[in-house]
């Protein structure tokens, strides 16, 4: 099983069967949603509860798309318990929360994560995350990145516990649900699907994580 400290298997062991799984998912997403226009595509990764492998999936998928030559940005939108920065060995400072509060520019929060890959850490934890994630400043950031990058992948906190994922879903081109084998309850997944659809999001599919 993957843990956050060995998240980037797509980079460290590209010949592994796990990396091949990420390439398969990359191909599916490419065929389904990647636009052939001047603007990039924004995708949200959501899960019913925490600890279901969403951040690991997002990080590896971002690496896989970058290996294909896509210009990719990964944004940690979990402003309550950020963890994406750990996968890339980065400090969790001057991140998305700083930008949303007006303390940093869009250029200042971007960190180089690899070839054609950039990461925006979550930054300082905030109690008013929904207000900021649903703000016009967040919308402006996504619009700016869509003009410069092929793919923008958003991480989010648990969809059933917080409203954050629903607010973000309304600003995306599609949502991918992440479930953990033998842990995620069917009813929780069904409720999460309903919440995303109520937000007007396009559900692209469900990834079952850690299946033996």
Image: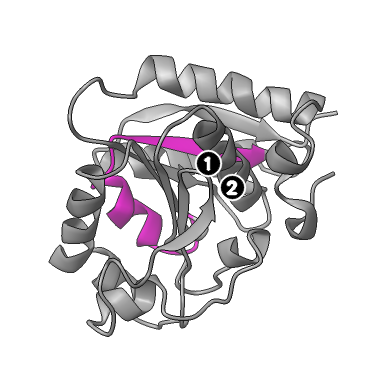
Q: Quadrant of the N terminus?
A: top right
What residue would you read off at disc 1? 62
What residue lies at 34% left-to-right and 23% top-to-bottom? 33
Classify residue 31 as left or right of residue 172. Answer: right
Q: Position of residue 14 (x, y in %)?
A: 74, 31
Q: Quadrant of the C terminus?
A: top right
First to last magenta residue range: 159-179
Name the residue nearer the viewer: 188 or 81: 81
Secondary structure beneath disc 1? helix
Q: Are marks 2 and 1 in contact (CB under 8 Å)?
A: yes
Examine the rendered structure and indicate whether residue 22 appears above or below residue 127. above
What residue would you read off at disc 2? 59
Q: Position of residue 165 (x, y in %)?
A: 39, 54
Q: Position of residue 141 (x, y in %)?
A: 22, 59
State whether residue 125 appears in this view.
Answer: yes
Mark 2 nearby-residue class (10 Å; few <14, some 14–19, many ≥20)? many
């Amino acid at each position: 099983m993957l843990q956050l400290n060995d998240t980037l298997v797509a980079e460290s062991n590209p010949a592994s069967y796990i990396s091949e799984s990420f390439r398969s998912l990359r191909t599916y997403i490419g065929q389904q949603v990647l636009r052939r226009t001047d603007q990039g595509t924004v995708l949200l990764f959501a899960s019913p509860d925490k600890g279901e492998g969403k951040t690991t999936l997002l990080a590896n998928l971002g690496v896989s798309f970058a290996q294909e030559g896509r210009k990719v940005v990964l944004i940690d939108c979990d402003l309550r318990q950020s963890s994406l920065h750990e996968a890339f060995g980065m400090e969790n400072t001057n991140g998305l929360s700083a930008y949303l509060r007006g303390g940093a520019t869009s250029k200042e929060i971007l960190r180089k994560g690899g070839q054609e890959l950039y990461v925006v850490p979550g930054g300082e934890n905030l109690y008013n995350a929904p207000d900021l994630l649903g703000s016009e400043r967040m919308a402006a950031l996504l619009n700016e990145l869509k003009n410069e990058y092929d793919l923008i992948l958003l991480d989010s906190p648990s969809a059933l516990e917080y409203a954050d994922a629903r607010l973000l879903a309304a600003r995306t081109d599609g949502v991918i649900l992440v479930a953990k084998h033998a842990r995620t309850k069917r009813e929780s997944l069904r409720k999460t699907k309903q919440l995303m659809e109520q937000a007007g999001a396009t559900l692209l599919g469900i990834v079952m994580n850690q299946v033996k």
